[in-house]
Image (cartoon, helix red, strand yellow):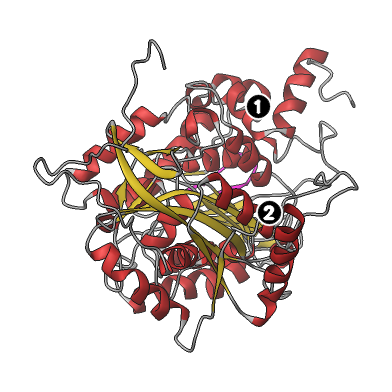
Amino acid sequence: MANINTKLSSEHERFLKASFDNLITFGKLFLGGDFNKSETPLFHYEIGEELISKSRKPCAIILPRGHAKTTLVKAKIVRDLCFAHKTLEWGLADEEKTHFFGWVSSNQKKSRNNVAYVQLHMEHNDVINFYFGKMGIGSLRGPVWNQEEIVTAYGDRLVSSSNLTSMRGDTLATIKEGALRYSCVFVDDAENEENTRTPGSRDKIVDNVMNGILPAIDKQYDGSRLFFIGTPVHYDAMIQNILDKWDKIKGTDEEKEYTWKVITYSATQPSMPGGVLWNSFMPRTKLEEIKRTYADSPKGVEGYYQEYELQVQSLENALWTRKHIKFHEAVYHYQDKRNWLIIDGQFVPVNTFIGCDPATDIDTKNSDYSVIMAIAVDQLGNVYVLEYERHRSIPTVAARDYKGEIIDRKGVVDYIIDLYNKYHCQSGTVEDVAMNRSVFQALNERKRQLGAWDVAIIPEKPGGNSKINRIYSGLSSRFSQGTVHLRETHFDLTNEIVKFGAKMSHDDTIETLYYACRYAYPPEESAIDSITGEWGGNDTPKARSWIVA
């Protein structure tokens, strides 16, 4: 590494180089009050890397409330203003570049607090002043230092506002470089429930961002870009529309061509530590406390799911709400050739069924999901979703070697047979369209190989109705009567239920629920005691003592 500063030790040089290369390292070393409160989660590193990358593509960062979106933006601005006129001197860049940043917040108070944060560190942070302060001044404070705007000692400028319109086409005049356009603009939580209330106000936001701010950003330099940061507040808001389009194409070849770079996570993440996005700071216990607070507020529990799980519901057009969903913790049990669910310690007889919506059309195979779902139906008509598999780009049937072992991935047919046998199903229903015929052909061949002729699959043609009408007519009575029970881990299905409608991104899982319920029926034999009204009968399994179980 080049000698950054002859007055600094090699240890200090490594210190600076690490801070320049990594935003989180810069935050921990120079902004410790914010970055050392808890263990840094992985998604912060991902966002930090994107904030200082050389990409010029607009970036949407869509995260729950309280997950440090604004803190990361502050760190990026402070870092860039600190290094702006030292990188050339220290050999970290090939040229010197004056920064001109625009920062839009949701209200004037937040806007001024953001500027105050930058001012505080650039004027009074001793560590920053030691490394980056201008000779003779001892800090980075410049000639303009007010609540809406600062100009540093080196001439870099930050303008902050609560009004998107004020950011349209602004420029900075310098003697050395002439007129400068924006280096970066950060639209940070600028959408709120007030300014997205009407179609006209939502259109105005889009117009200001896409036709005013985005063209005003200087695209000649690496890293000059728009950052659109926030949490969805309306089903037709700009950030929600970006998210809807991305949700349809993520994981496909189209994702690379998408206009926006999108980084998004909801608060619940089953595969992450603690099952949440930021376990060291926002653990499950804290999220549950927040959820209870919302439940007791006028906004209701839907407010929690909007702000933390990024599930925005159109209250005007909602077909179903979260109130239509019930959750269960039933345990499946098979005994004496009968299916049972153990619910609150009682054995409840059920019938079990499979539904499948395969994505095998060549046009949708890599964008839609293939879903295979197992459900149980009790004698009262309650539906319990037991388990489902949801996969993108899986084959119709798995390839196997000469021993019959799967070579790569399971296919749709393999999941159908596995779930069918696991839950001893009465029958299954699979969507029957021309492009899905390969599923039935492969299923019949696999049944022949296994001798599994008891696997009964009913082909169901979609018919002439639209998909939304078909699903709604098939499930509306079950939801209205409150008979549909999911597991709390069924996030995809829950999300599709509460977003069900014309604007939903995916409907694969809820359509599979429709197919699973299409020919489902309750057990024929009554197991209800005519006197007590409770489940019973001589053939009902009894719970055994744990000592001998």
Q: Look at discs 1 and 2 and give the one toward the viewer.
A: 2
**Splitting the image into 4 quarters, where does residue 73 fall?**
top right
Stretch in magenta: 149-157
The residue at the far bottom in this view is 464
Task: Residue at 57% x, 48% y: name it.
Answer: 421
The image shows residue 543 at horizontal and vertical percentages of 32, 25
SS at badge 1: helix
Note whether residue 194 is visible: no
In contact (CB < 8 Å): disc 1 and disc 2: no
Q: Nearer the viewer, residue 151 or 382?
A: 382
Label 1 amino acid? Answer: Thr
Q: Nearer the viewer, residue 209 or 420?
A: 420
Q: Identify the residue position indicated by label 1 in the image.
A: 25
Task: Residue at 32% x, 34% y: name it.
Answer: 288
**Splitting the image into 4 quarters, where does residue 200 fall?**
bottom left
The image shows residue 298 at horizontal and vertical percentages of 16, 51
Is the residue 339 above or below the residue 28 in the image? Answer: below
Image position of 151 (left or right of 342): right
Task: Residue at 54% x, 35% y: name it.
Answer: 141
The stretch drawn in magenta includes residue 190? no
SS at badge 2: helix
Quadrant where the C terminus is found in the figure: top left
The residue at the far top in this view is 547
Q: Mark 1 or mark 2: which comes first in sequence? A: 1
Label 2 amino acid? Answer: Asp
Q: Nearer the viewer, residue 255 or 492?
A: 492
Q: Which mark is residue 140?
A: none
Q: Identify the residue position indicated by label 2 in the image.
A: 414
